[in-house]
Image: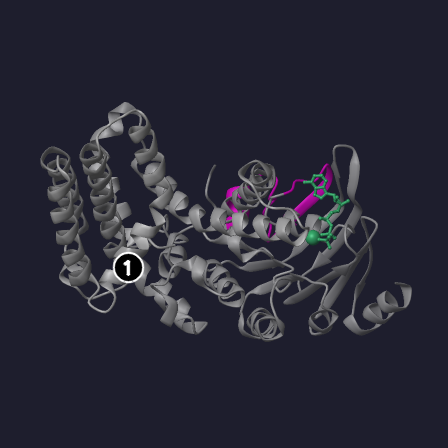
Amino acid sequence: MGTLFRPGASFLHRLPAGAKLLALIILVTLISIIATNPLTGIAVLIAILGLFTIAFPANGPALLAKQLWSLKYLLAIIVIPQLLFGSSWPAVAANALRLTDAILLASLFTMTTKNSEMVATIERASQPLKPLGVKPQTLSLAISMAINAIPMIAKFSAQTKEAQLARGVKPTAALMTVPLLVASLKYADDFAEALTARGVEI
Amino acid sequence: MLIDLNAVSVAFDGKTALDGVSVKLDQKRIGVIGLNGSGKSTFARLLNGLVTPTSGLVTVGGINPAKDAKAARRQTGFIFSNPDVQIIMPTVLEDVAFSLRSSGLSTGDIQTRALAVLQRFKIDHLADQAAHSLSGGQKQLLAISAIVVAEPKLIVADEPTAMLDLTNSRRVAEVLLDELEQQVVLVTHDLNLAANCDIILRFAGAKLVEFGEPAPIISAYLAEN
Ligand SMILES: Nc1ncnc2c1ncn2[C@@H]1O[C@H](COP(=O)(O)OP(=O)(O)OP(=O)(O)O)[C@@H](O)[C@H]1O
Ligand SMILES: [Mg+2]
């Protein structure tokens, strides 16, 4: 998966996870306030490109391009309805850029932060929520497992697609849903058993 | 450790999966063979309480897994065929470290131990990799590492090489049968692996039909099927 941790020795890798998380929250808030026209959005995008290059000197721009490409459907879903409802081009572009910038920053955070550090930070940050019934350890375990489930679901969807192509069926969203659901439920079942075997109470 | 089954039967929704199995085992390498649906996995799952007997009694090292599943799972590690379902944490080292989360050790000690186990199975160069990016054989070695780090007394492996190619199967079998100091129960369709065990159990139609020296049992199995 593109957004998983990638080892590196950069300044951004060495920054403590808590500081990075705080910076991420502040930057995303700032972007949503100031990036109200396409030009600001593009300027921020260029700054993010700089950060990617600092984090991954060998292939920062390529990684950013990959992340951008993976956002194409999301952007289509957001841009098309706005245009249909008659928003102006600059407004739509500014919105799309704002969202893109925020997501790219968040993925830069996950790409430069080890899951274990992220989890520890989330556990610490969620301590104040304890009185509300939130269990920090359960929360962080759930987040780790969700991160882990993404490549599995991607694998099932590739397998389903191939199986349908092999049988001469053109895979569509409607045709994919049931097999994908069945595969995911089977995985969930087997995974639950493996968790139990490793002593996790569920 | 003594694995003791006394007249154990298991039924799922009225359908018999194991029928009146009695056996005492203390060998170090215990192989389990039999056709699909004969009851091998049900037998294996009894040993750590993933399945509980409908009647009869199972004890492993004096612990009844149906009564004290927590203690049973601490002393018995379980390896499944599908390495994908066994990975809990996103990266290799974290997944191994996860097994020690309630050990009371410091974070530093946990990391050290986890890394030592990865070194032992020669996958320490993968420590920071995304676990899902590993090959099938590497994933299975990761699963074994994540079990071994918790130092169980017994390791049960249910067809651990079923999804692996020849080279990886050989490596995983070598680890399970030659390198581990623990007692191992190995369920397998690979009769070459079964032949290397100290004792084998053959299941057929939910019954334990014979157990003992591998060679004659394998010959009988081949002749019958
Ligand atoms: N959870 C379950 N629910 C219902 N039936 C089950 C369950 N687990 C096993 N069975 C049934 O019990 C019987 C024995 O199954 P088991 O999985 O122990 O066989 P096996 O020897 O491991 O087979 P295989 O070689 O295919 O893995 C089979 O008929 C199977 O369908
Ligand atoms: Mg089985």
Residue reaching furthest to the right: B224
Range shown magenta: B51-73
Q: Is residue A73 left or right of residue A36?
A: right
The foreground one among B191 and B180 is B191
The foreground one among B115 and B70 is B115
The foreground one among A58 and A110 is A58
Q: Can you identify the residue that label 1 sits on?
A: A63
The foreground one among B2 and A191 is A191
Task: Name the quadrant containing residue B126.
Answer: bottom left
**Residue B75 seen in this snapshot:** no
Task: Name the quadrant containing residue B222.
Answer: bottom right
Q: Residues within 10 Å of mark 1 (few under 14, many from 20)?
A: some
Q: Residue B31 at x, y = what percent?
A: 70, 64
Q: Residue A136 at x, y = what percent?
A: 29, 36
Q: Is residue B130 magenta?
A: no
Q: Is residue B84 left or right of residue A120?
A: right
Q: Is residue B64 magenta?
A: yes
Q: Classify B123 as above or below B44.
A: below
Q: Classify B131 as above or below A177.
A: below
Q: Which residue is rendered at x = 28% and y = 62% of the image?
A: A62
Q: Which residue is rendered at x = 66% and y = 40% of the image?
A: B52
Q: Classify B37 as above or below B218.
A: above
**Residue A38 seen in this snapshot:** yes
Q: Residue B59 at x, y = what percent?
A: 64, 48
- The secondary element bearing badge 1 is classed as helix
Q: Chain of mark 1?
A: A
Q: Amino acid at mark 1?
A: Leu
